[in-house]
Image (cartoon, coloured by chain):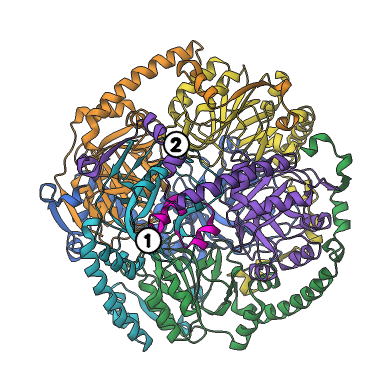
Chain colours: A green, B purple, C cyan, D yellow, E orange, F blue
């Protein structure tokens, strides 16, 4: 394992981060051509909170939170801490004390491919956490890892400075170089969705709005009344 | 995969659906002789909501929501949309736009053997969702499936028109032909449970109320005081 | 399987239980040298509730809640019911009626290595439940097990009278013989954490407070500016 | 749960079963339009054995093999025993003694949505077993179920008399009414695959043989040399 | 975590271990009243090997094999090494070098609630391994644990000197104090099974041999011919 | 999703690949400082085969093997095909026909974060496969992906040309730029292991060879005879 702590990593413009936070996870994911999602495994411990910010990354040994301590020092106002582990781990690597230190530095939340604890206190503090597990199980401080090298979390490659957006639907990561184009694509998607929503509220069908009837026909999908259905197909 | 869209499927009387909704999932499941439960894997994304209605079924390819669009058109006031997938899939097949279209048609909720997204918006809309996953991960519209043929969801066979009941405990399905007998059995069970609850509130024990003491004896279960317990059994 | 029901098991002093409840799961676990946690798999069905008490244990056959009925009779004011199963089981072994009977006896909650149901009602009653599953799936009463013999739940050995503490972070068990020393250790830890929290609120870093900088150095961890980073490490 | 034992169930012609066995699981599954597969969870305990036959079905309570005893009596020469459980179960429901009784009756194998044991002996006997688990964990005989009613195993609806085919790739089920058309479709597929295999052995590409190049183009897939690739895409 | 290494632990008579080895896992588990099984999760990396011996136990931190080194020294001729981890861990804690050291000391195998590697070499050496995972992922030597204190592995309490038996069906543990009674019960079971096997080979049914027909009747199980079956039950 | 097919990707010297293949997965992983392992989830379908080669990567949609067809064309003598999926998928994406085409091109094996089928035939052909699942479940050819862009498989970032090594212990990936230094480190490790093996065969202990006794002492680990052990610690 590389044992470096990297300082002074690049970050996006705060205004760009704000835009991505407003769009939310599902929109950003779609706007990037359905990429960047951390999938169904990392879940928020709270409801109704959206967090976005450039990633400060840490790679920890299972059951060892030493490198989170090193990562805290690298966090600046608005950053999101992203913690990967060298192998699957269920421990509660992170709790109230870390959240206290991070809130002092202006960090709104955490994404961790492991467990968190003190979840009640985190919710009361309004500190957002997206984690694979909730567990009281404590950690040691014995083995080296790194800070601000690229990490893989839930199948996504995340580099320091990439923008992490997290809400009730999960987490998405936007590569730093693609922030601008993603915002543009989000804007287009939001406009399109608003029009679709209005149409759906009026009763228009997706089949018509998206022009799917010819596709169904091309794929050989046929309509049949239940009354005409073969007995075998009714069962 | 059969590629049919079946129209004009049978449905139960709305009053019967209302009765089943009042009983809730656990009671209906018990009244059917402990059958019909979709088990522990499909979870609600909200708390405190009970939904019931005849199933409109859709079978989708993993990561492809084309047939949900076709299913929406088959939904009528009071129906519940039930989505199966041809193989396990974690995608967010369903979100706010679909819910908007379905609410317009009077559909109160969705059961899906896959993922949903826009969960915060769904909760705010009061649209019920029971899903195996929550994920922002988006889908394509490329591969055929079917609508209103029988499907298997979480180990249960569900046909269009079968009544789906869903609450905080999960989901249960009542075959259309068994709706009447199930309601009768539910009524009997509810009356019996009310009497049991009253007895338990007075301190009666299940051992006595259900006559279990002779069963324990027949099975060779013995009482022993901790003070008389073998050291080996205390550890 | 041993088929005994053990009566008159030992219990700790209620005041000691009260102290452990105040400390909460994470603190108790740490104070015992990071032992006793039931890990990440048993989750509460409610938020914001902490329960503690001596364990009354039951061992059930999968899908069979006969021995829970026997265990209820052994429960006294303040006890916590702990249910193990002879093999993994997803059923809803426990619901509102059991909770009614237990509340009558002064039992505040349940820890079960299986499923619960009637979760909405349990929340409304304020009866705490920590379970591996939520499922409406009902059980039979046909096979013997035991009550108040030691059980293994989620990898932890729990004997009757051992103190179970459960909150939003999960569950921890304190062996009866170690209650006193655990309270002492919790007090020390709480005092230390309060001081650390205050320091972190002032901006002190864990790296400094815990003296981790020499450890990082000993482990060969080096600092490097992003600007000086090898291209290969930036990707 | 229905508590019936159904006798004298329908069966396909043995010659048809022989044909399906020769084709194997993957071919049969494809010939049915990619349906009928029991997926990736039920695995053989042996290698290199293919079994096929009409299903005799049993539904057992978790940890209870009573109904397997009842099912043995319903098995005839060439049948395959198919065991479902009322909820997930890891027990070893089936071992050498059952296999001895079934081999006496001419049954070549078992498909079970649970566990088996005595796996070494089963392999030595040449009795095929496809199971979700291997476990020494024993069962009781206490709770009713049924025999030869339809069951769901690993998401597939299986009725008595439906043909089960099982090999190293898993298990597939052919509805009794579709046996004839499936054999015809298998023959076509086998012929086509032989031609494809011969072509591939000569170096033809799937892209050309299946005419996929226009599809790639229509989907917007473009070719680019690594030398011309954007730096961001190389990482 | 307790940080002790316990020496000179008790062991059973080698002849008793030999008897248990001959009986195998399923028989021993049944003879103990269906207890002691480590279930379906720990699997052998080889086929056809049975190992038995008194346990030398080690408790390791996830991803850290320091205590295995300490445990090796405590192993004597015929012992089986049993490794637990303080939390779930997928690493390959154990490989060819450890096996070399243990074979030198006369240890025939290992049971580990974690991963192993060098599996090809272990098979070639004839060193038995039962593990939760196979993984090349390496470990560190940084965190304390203990040797020869009781551990929980796969839900079973194992103390040093308890006899571990492992074969293709998994692993079972016999408490040291129960070795003698278990051997007696195994002998009875083996005799009974031999008689049953002979009867089954002659065509006798379990229904008759175990007297299950009256039980089925008492449970309300009825026989019905498929020809008389309700249409709804045939589907 | 990027929809590119990248041609003429870089590759290492064949002699370097040969060296890595000789070292095997565990040695390479350790030599890279315990990085690069694809963990415990991707398993070989055969035993005793080691494969190594530069990666040709493909990213497929779940249940869709279109891009594998495109990837075959990019494979050259000695390459290893590496298939990622855009979300978890259990399908059998790859079988005998693909293996036939790849063997014609000199490709020795496949690593796939999904399922394979025709496993018996693959074994008979001597074509190596490491997969997350075995399943007969077939795929469609409908949705675009890419070939020879970097992919994440089982938490590892793999770029075209990176060297993949796979054996009974799993899979490891060596970044192209680190092939030379990895070979050097492997040589050192192999020499060291041979010396250790020889020492262990003579009875030397790891505690002494690795100098671990002072570490145990520093960590506070103490030796105690079982006879002197506290009763509480014996249980």
Q: In the rendered view, would you say F83 is above or below F218?
A: above
On screen, residue F193 above or below B180: below
Left or right of residue E70, residue E186 in this image: right
Horizontal side of residue E203 vs A145, given as left or right: right
Q: Name the front one of labels 1 and 2.
A: 2
Q: Would you name the residue on which mark 1 appears?
A: F185
Residue occupying the point 80% across, 47% down? B11
Circle 2 SS class: loop
> Which residue, given by chain and number where applicable, does mark 2 sit on?
B211
Question: How far apart are labels 1 and 2 at the CA level?
Answer: 72 Å
Q: Residues within 10 Å of mark 1 (few under 14, many from 20)?
A: some
Residue F164 visible in the picture: yes
Q: Which residues are magenta?
A: C100-128
Indicate left or right for A143 with D233 as reference.
left
Q: x%, y% of residue E34?
A: 37, 33
Quadrant including the N terminus of chain F: bottom right
Camera-side residue of F173 and C85 = C85
Crowd around label 2: few <14 · some 14–19 · many ≥20 (10 Å) = few
Q: Residue furthest left?
A: F228
Q: Is residue B52 left or right of residue B35?
A: right
Is residue C107 in the magenta section?
yes
Q: Is residue D123 magenta?
A: no
- The residue lying toward the viewer, choosing from E76 and B129, is B129
Q: Are marks 1 and 2 in contact (CB under 8 Å)?
A: no
């Amino acid at each position: 394992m590389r044992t470096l702590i990297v300082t002074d990593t690049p970050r996006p413009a705060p205004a760009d981060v704000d835009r991505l936070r407003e769009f939310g996870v599902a929109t950003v994911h779609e706007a990037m051509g359905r990429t960047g999602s951390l999938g169904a495994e990392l879940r928020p411990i709270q409801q109704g909170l959206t967090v976005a910010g450039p990633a400060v990354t840490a790679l920890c040994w299972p059951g060892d939170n030493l490198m989170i301590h090193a990562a805290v020092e690298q966090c600046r106002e608005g950053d999101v801490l992203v913690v990967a582990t060298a192998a699957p781990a269920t421990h509660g690597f992170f709790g109230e004390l870390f959240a206290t230190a991070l809130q002092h530095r202006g960090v709104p939340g955490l994404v961790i491919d492991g467990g968190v604890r003190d979840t009640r206190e985190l919710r009361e503090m309004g500190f957002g956490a997206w984690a694979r597990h909730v567990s009281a199980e404590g950690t040691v401080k014995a083995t080296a890892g790194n800070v601000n090298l690229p990490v893989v979390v839930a199948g996504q490659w995340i580099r320091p400075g990439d923008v992490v957006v997290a809400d009730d639907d999960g987490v998405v990561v936007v590569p730093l170089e693609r922030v601008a184009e993603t915002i543009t694509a989000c804007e287009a998607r939001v406009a399109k969705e608003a029009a679709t929503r209005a149409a759906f509220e009026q009763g228009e069908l997706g089949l018509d709005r998206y022009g799917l009837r010819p596709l169904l026909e091309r794929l050989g999908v046929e309509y049949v009344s239940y009354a005409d259905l073969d007995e075998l197909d009714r069962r």
